[in-house]
Image: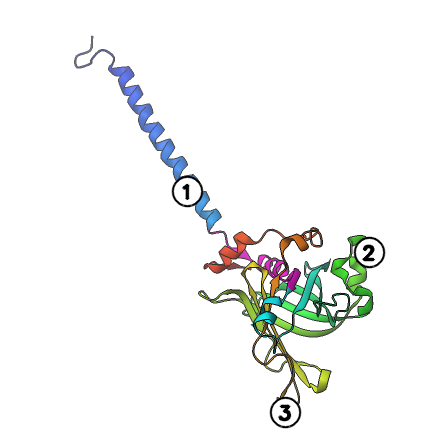
Amino acid sequence: MVIGSEPGSGSSDSAGGWSVARGLLVKTLVMIGGALLLKRLTKSTTRWDHARLVSRSLSGEKFSKDQAARDPDHYFNIRMVTCPAAEMVDGSNVLYFEQAFWRTPQKPFRQRFYMVKPCPKELKCDVELSSYAIRDAEEYKNFCDRSKDQRPLPEEVIGDIAEHLTTIHLKRCERGKRCLYEGSTPPDSFPNLWNGAAYCTLELAIHKNNEIHAWDRGFDGDGNQVWGPKEGPYEFKPAPASSTNDMFSSLNFPIQQSMEKRIEGSFVLQE
């Protein structure tokens, strides 16, 4: 027998060593798991994520019904409908947009194509939203209400994109504001000859739950407003989901609720 040793001490040392090793292994796994979870929670939003969220927020059937009920002297109940129409080679989303009085949805008074893509890297904004005239607007009336086989094909849509009308550069709203994105036309605005106007301006804000605030106004050469509301933007709220589920079931945009929460917070914008 070796002096100083005790019966069973070899197995005891082995058990103690394994216990320490197991503890270290558990701590390592916890640290790795925590790091992965932290990375997932702090995952930054890309430039294309912003563009997709704006496209999704604009899409759907919306009404200014509540605003018209509050202030019928200055606002009408207008139906606004937007839906995906095509995708450009560079990934930009092309949306079809129309507005009509709610009683006569089959007779839109405004029709446009929207092109949504990330802002150019040299500009301090998140999403570039451009509007274009439609080459044969009559052919596109109630585009979003039709089944897919009754709509012009995506390649036809791209071919029918006519002259450029306006461009808005949208930025994420500052913390504490109700909106997600907001933007306006540049100071020099865009030409517009309707109802005696010389140019037009547009201010746009995208809120949570797909609510859109849009303020279109026309001005003459002396800066006098000749069309559009003077009191503030139109407020378009989504129609009940039951009335739009079928119409927009083909939307190819991801669910946005988690993204909205990330946009409300502070995160790094990746290039």
Please, what is the three-letter code of the amino acid marked with disc 2?
Gln
Whole-percent x and y of residue 7? 22, 11
Question: Residue 137 bears which disc, if any?
Answer: none
242 w.r.t. 181: above or below: above
- Single out the residue that lies furthest toward the top: 1
Residue drawn at point x = 54 percent, y = 60 percent: 208
Report the quarter where the C terminus lies: bottom right
Helix, strand or loop for disc 2? helix
Q: Is residue 107 left or right of residue 55?
A: right
User: In the rendered image, which residue does mark 2 sit on?
Assistant: 150
Is 50 colored magenta in this rendering? yes
Q: Nearer the viewer, mark 3 or mark 2?
A: 2
Whole-percent x and y of residue 238? 62, 60
Q: Which residues are magenta?
A: 42-62
Residue 197 is drawn in which quadrant?
A: bottom right
User: In the rendered image, which residue does mark 1 sit on?
Assistant: 34
Please, what is the three-letter code of the amino acid marked with disc 3?
Asp
Q: Is residue 45 left or right of residue 6?
A: right
User: In the rendered image, which residue does mark 3 sit on?
Assistant: 222
Q: Nearer the viewer, mark 1 or mark 3?
A: 3
Residue drawn at point x = 78 percent, y = 54 percent: 147
Helix, strand or loop for disc 1? helix
